Image (cartoon, rainbow, N blue to C red):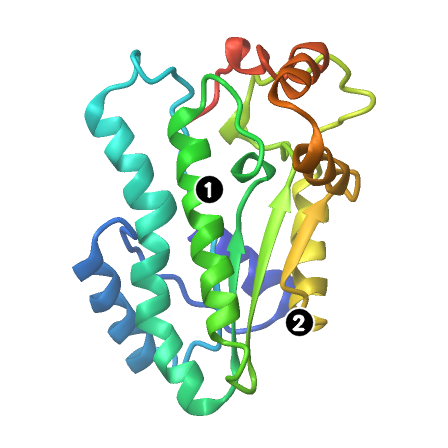
Amino acid sequence: METCEEISLTTGAECHYFLCDVANREDVYKQAKVVREKVGDVTILVNNAAVVHGRSLLDSDDDALMKTQHINTLGQFWTTKAFLPRMLELCHGHVVCINSILSLSSIPGAIDYCTSKASSLAFMESLTLGLLDCPGVGCTTMLPFHTNTDMFQGMRVRFPQLFPPLNPELVAQRTVDAVRTNTSFVYLPWTMHALVILKSFLPQAALEEIQRFTGCYTCMDTFKGRT
């Protein structure tokens, strides 16, 4: 509600908010209907909802593991199914996923999050290809490095000067830019492209040593974020 009020005050634009549990399929479909009736057609869908519990597999509660998958992954299925059909009818729309570089390079201590983000990336890759012949409707997947929010509070890498956390405003602006240019996949910062290249040819033993050297192997040891 506060964000909605801030947008209205600073921009003068009309803004609405609706409470929805994206992990609940029926709630998503119900709220999607309410949005269409009260506001109109949704032509930009941003899937940004996510949680992380910051524990190893054996230390994780079963319900917590399920919660992560339902919110981070399955929630995208329900929201996209709810709004994409009308975008296709209008030949106008965009589906955005705020993913993570951890979908491509997992770390210990966030097994629930990494798994869900890898699934989410596969979902978006398939969806993007499936919409190639659908004029006016596109997809954008953002793959940022650690973003400076409360979600991953306490996470530490060995060389923060070389790998500083991203500013949320920067990620938001790059997302808007990507939608405007219909860019399918965006890595933030650009150096994350090197990670993808290295993983394509380095042996696993070398990748493990890089993880240890950069501190990624232990970065979640100081995790204090929220779920």
Could you say where residue 125 lies in the image, as x and y percent from the top left? 51, 59
Task: Look at the image and tell me whether residue 49 can be seen.
Answer: no
**Vertical arrangement, residue 116 with respect to residue 3, above or below:** above
Could you say where residue 209 lies in the image, as x and y percent from the top left? 68, 12
**Vertical arrangement, residue 102 with respect to residue 120, above or below:** above
**Vertical arrangement, residue 173 with respect to residue 66, above or below:** below
Tag shown at residue 182:
2
In this rendering, position of residue 206 left or right of residue 99: right
Task: Look at the image and tell me whether residue 131 can be seen.
Answer: yes
Could you say where residue 33 lies in the image, as x and y percent from the top left? 25, 75
Tag shown at residue 118:
1
In which quadrant of the rendered image does the C terminus lie?
A: top left
Q: At 44% across and 82% down in the image, what residue appears?
A: 87
Q: Residue furthest left?
A: 26
Q: Secondary structure at mark 1?
A: helix
Other residues around mark 1 within 10 Å, as few (<14) / some (14–19) / many (≥20): many
Q: Residue furthest right?
A: 161
Which circle's residue, 1 or 2, is located before the other in the chain?
Answer: 1
Q: At 53% across and 15% down in the image, what residue appears?
A: 220
Callout 1 amino acid: Ala
* Residue 65 figure quarter: top left
CA gap between label 1 and label 2 equals 22 Å
Could you say where residue 4 lies in the image, as x and y percent from the top left? 48, 58
Callout 2 amino acid: Asn
